[in-house]
Image (cartoon, rainbow, N blue to C red):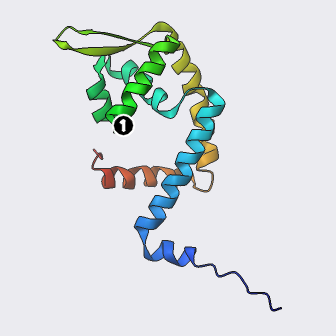
Amino acid sequence: MARTSRVAYFPRLATERLDIALCRASAAVARAADAHATEEGLGVGQHLVLQMLQAVGPCSQQTLSEELRIDRSVMVTICDDLERAGYARRERNPRDRRSYAVTITEPGRERLATAQAAVPAFLDATFDALTPGERDQLGTLLGKLLGTDA
């Protein structure tokens, strides 16, 4: 029986369809981030929430959800988990008593510092195919696509 050689179609597809290439690259980075988060014991969403709370102070779950682009139902679970771990707490929002503000705790700050320390090595390993200049260029291009460039 004749053996068929494998057709390498994806490289051509990725060149012709940047949307497909970006989706595949995004999925690969997301898998790497999830694996890293599992090793670190702090989920990607949890890390992002703690990082934002430390940077901007107490926020409503709605604000966290909108700014971090995390579905509201997922945000509830993230905040529940952070509160259960003692990394964040919910308090009545002093500006709007109908809502709650999520606040990072001191153990949350410590946990975030530990997680943040591991990020550079993770990024270096994940983007090792790119030079530092290419990484900067990728950041700039993604900022344009996302409408977040300065």
115 shown above or below 30 = above
Mark 1 crowdedness (10 Å alpha carbons): few <14, some 14-19, many ≥20 = some
User: In which image quadrant can residue 137 be found?
Assistant: bottom left
Residue 36: in sight, yes or no? yes
Q: Position of residue 58 (x, y in %)?
A: 31, 15
Which residue is at a point 73% across and 85% down the rendered structure image?
5
Q: Position of residue 37 (x, y in %)?
A: 58, 33
Dot 1 amino acid type: Ile
103 shown above or below 51 = above
Which residue is at a point 50% across and 51% down the rendered structure image?
135
Quadrant assignment for the N terminus: bottom right
Compared across the picture, whether 49 is left or right of 10 comes to: left
12 shown above or below 58 = below
Quadrant assignment for the C terminus: top left
Which residue is at a point 46% across and 59% down the rendered structure image?
23
Compared across the picture, whether 30 is left or right of 70 comes to: right
Where disc 1 sits, the SS reads loop
Which residue is at a point 42% across and 68% down the rendered structure image?
18
Compared across the picture, whether 127 is left or right of 82 comes to: right
Q: Which residue is mark 1?
A: 70
Q: Position of residue 61 (x, y in %)?
A: 30, 24
146 shown above or below 34 = below
Q: How many marks?
A: 1
**Which residue is outermost to the right?**
1
Residue 51: in sight, yes or no? no
